Amino acid sequence: MFEALSDRLEDALRKVKGQHRISEDNVSETLREVRRALLEADVNFQVTKDFIENVKEKALGQDVLKSLTPGQQIVKVLHDELVDLMGSERVDLTFAKTGPTVIMVAGLQGSGKTTFSAKLAKHLKSSGRHPLLVAADVYRPAAIGQLKQLAEQISIPVYSGDEKLPVKIAEESLEYARKNMCNVIIIDTAGRLSIDEQMMQEVADIKERVKPTEILFVVDSMTGQDAVNTAKAFHDKLDYNGVVLTKLDGDTRGGAALSIRRVVDKPIKFASVGEKLEALEPFHPDRMASRILGMGDIVTLAEKAQEQFDENEAEKLEQKMRKNQFTLEDFYSQLQAIKKMGPLSSVMEMIPGLGKAMRGVEIDDNSFVKIEAIIQSMTPEERNKPAIINGSRRKRIAGGSGTSVQDVNRLLKQFTDMQKMMKRLTRGGMRQFAKGMMNQNFS
C-alpha cells in the first residue's frame, strides 16, 4: 500500500533529517521533492498545491520543539497535514434510531461494490447486527449469483425478488427485512462502465423510494484521478454520505486516498485491503498517514490481534515462550490466528520498520500452505517434542504432506532458530525469520 509514495517521501525527508536547524532553504528543497512525489502519486494538482503551502507555512512558522530535531519536526508537520487532508478523524456509519438502517452502495462497474457489500455485511454481523444483502444489480451477468455466493460464505440472507426492476427490488426489501428481523439492509446497486444518465437516474430513484440512512460511494483507488472525478459526478447527483476505497492493497501511489476527501468534502469511511471478506478496515486518517510515512500502524494491528487472540491463551503462550516451551502445536495455532488478521503483506506493513524491511520479499496468503501441511502430518507427540523427529520420521512426514525431506528439515531448522530468536528478538532477527518462513523454497 502506497509503497512508491512512501519511498519518495522518505527520500525527500532524508535531506533535511541531518540538518541542525530548519531554514527556508532546506524546507523549500524538501518540499519540492514532496510536491513531485505527490504529483507522481496522482494526487490532485490543487490539493497538492494547498498541501505544500500549508506544510511550508507551519514548518517555518513554528519554533522547533526542543524534543524534536528539525527532521522530526518536518515529519510531524507532514503527518499532521496528511491527517487533515484525509479527514482528521474517523467517521463511522450512521444507524437509524427506529426501524432498519438502509445502506445504499453505489459506484461504477468493476469498482468492487458487490464484494464490499458482502464485506460490510460480515463486518456488521461481527459487531452484533443482523444484516440483509439486497441484489439490485439486475444488469451485470452473474451479479446476483456472486452476491448470493459471497453471502453464503458468511451465512447472511440475500433478497433478490422476482422483479427485474431495481427500484422495486430495493423497495420490497424493506418489508422482507422487517419480517425476517434484519436491522441493517445493504443494497448493492448496479454500476456501468462509465457514468451515464440512465445509471444516475436509477440510483437517484432508489434513493427517493427507500430513503437510505447511508449512501456509500465505492471507488477503485487504483484509478487515481479518474476515481476522484467519478466521485464528484456521483456526489453531485446523490449527495452521498461517505466514500469506500477498494483495492487499496494494490495501490502503490495513493492519489485517490489523498485527493478524494478534499475534492468532494465527504469522509472516507472504509478501506478494502485485500480479496478476503475479512479484509475491510474502518478508515482512520491518522493511522493511514502513519503508514504513508513508514511509521506502521500498531493500533490497528493491536485491534486485529485482539479480535483473533484469546487473552488467557496469549498469557499462557507468553509463559511458554519465556520458559522456552513454545511448540510446533503452538506455532500452528498462531499461524491460523495470524491468517485471520488479513493479508500477510498488510499485517507486515503495520509493524514499524518491518514493512520496509520486507519490501521486495514475496509474501502472499499461500506462503504457509506447505508449512501447515508438514505440521499436520506430524503426530501430537512430534509437534510437542520436535527433537524426537529423526530421519525415518522426517521421511514419513514428508510423504504424508506431499513435500520433500529437505522441506521438513528446513521447517525444523527455522523453528529451532525462531525459538532462539524469541529470547532476544531484534529487528534484524525479525526480518531474517519472516523472510525465511515466508519466502523459503516451499513453492
Image: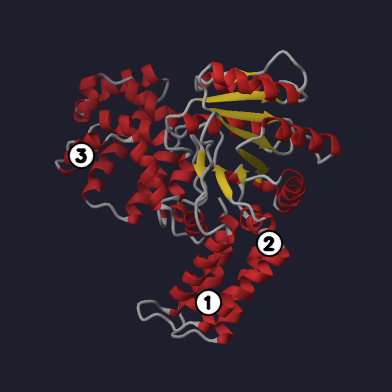
Q: Are circles 2 and 3 on residues that touch, CB within 8 Å?
A: no
Q: How many marks?
A: 3
Residue 40, disc: 2
Name the front one of labels 1 and 3: 3
Upstream in sequence: badge 2 or badge 3: 2
Q: Are circles 1 and 3 on residues that touch, CB within 8 Å?
A: no
Q: Amino acid at mark 3?
A: Glu
Residue 117, placed above or below residue 88: above
**Disc 2/disc 1 C-alpha distance (Å):** 19 Å
Q: How is the image coloured?
A: secondary structure
> At x 76% / y 25%, what residue is drawn?
140
**Disc 1/disc 3 C-alpha distance (Å):** 44 Å
Residue under numbered circle 3 = 315
Q: Which secondary structure, mark 2?
A: helix
Name the front one of labels 2 and 3: 3
Residue 384, placed above or below residue 400: below
Q: Which secondary structure, mark 1?
A: helix
Q: Which secondary structure, mark 3?
A: helix
Q: Are circles 2 and 1 on residues that touch, CB within 8 Å?
A: no
Crowding at label 3, few (<14), some or many (≥20) Cα neighbours within 10 Å? few
Q: Amino acid at mark 2?
A: Glu
> At x 19% / y 26%, what residue is drawn?
388
